[in-house]
Amino acid sequence: MFPFVRLIKDMLVASRQAPIHPTDIHVSHHMVWPWDLDAFAELNNGRTLTLYDLGRLGMGARSGLIGTLRTKKWSLTMAGSSVRYRRRLHAFQRFEMRSRTICWDDKFFYIEQSMWKPDGTCTSHVLYRAAVTSKNGIVPPREVGEAMGLDTTSPLAPDWVAAWIEAEAMRPWPPMQNVAKTHLREVA
């Protein structure tokens, strides 16, 4: 189940913090609860992604994006992600989450998030591709920026982000159709 109580808490905290630009780093603080754990008593990888939702929503509130979405009756959706898990988090461990928008193109925003232990160890890092949508489909980031009253010029994508964008453009879709045909030939 989505952590709605945590979301309410995080949105209240974000509403009391100073506004930020979408490319600024939003810092939020969290704790691993027993219901966040997997069979190995560490933060579940799926739950990690759910907790990253909280950081993005707090960042969206502080940057004015959430208000713009409400005003325009737009939504936010994830269109892809790449995650690195490097260190474990266990029950009752506290961690800091850092969230920021790196850049955007004609369709998507690219968002970077990371989790950090109090000793400065990074436990995971994720790159998301997100889109703002309306009843007519994807809203171009330029239009979103204009609605927020921001400069719509994107920062340059770092090389590692540009490489991921390029790799995603080469990825076949739908994937299962190609896999199923290959598998059937091998079995026959």
Image (tube, rainbow, N blue to C red):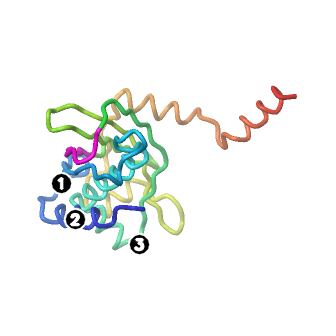
Q: Which residue is the site of mark 2?
A: 9
Image label count: 3
Mark 2: give few (<14), some (14-19) or many (20+) Cα within 10 Å: few
**Range covered by the magenta-colored residues:** 89-99
- Name the residue rendered at 42%, 50% in the picture: 130
* 178 lies above or below 104: above
Callouts 3 and 1 close, C-beta under 8 Å: no
In the rendered image, which quarter is residue 132 located in? bottom left
Measured Cα–Cα span from mark 1 to mark 2:
19 Å
* Element on which disc 2 rests: helix
Q: Quadrant of residue 139?
A: bottom left
Q: Could you tell me residue 62's position as x and y percent? A: 21, 59
Q: Which of the two labelled residues, at mark 1 and mark 2, occupies the earlier sequence position?
A: 2
Instruction: Point out the image quarter for the N terminus.
Output: bottom left
Residue contact between numbered discs 3 and 2, judged by CB atoms under 8 Å: no
- Check residue 9 for magenta coloring: no
Instruction: List x then y, in percent, for residue 63.
Output: 23, 58
Q: Is residue 16 above or below residue 160?
A: below
Residue closer to the observer: 61 or 179: 179
In the rendered structure, which amino acid carries the disc numbered 2? Answer: Lys
Alpha carbon of mark 3 to alpha carbon of mark 2: how far?
23 Å
Residue 133 vs 177, above or below: the answer is below
* Residue 52, percent from left and from top: 33, 49
Residue located at (20% from left, 49% from top): 26
Farthest residue toward the right? 188
Residue 73 circle label:
3
> Mark 1 sits on what residue?
20
> Going 27% across and 46% down the picture, which residue do you hit?
91
Dot 1 amino acid type: Ile
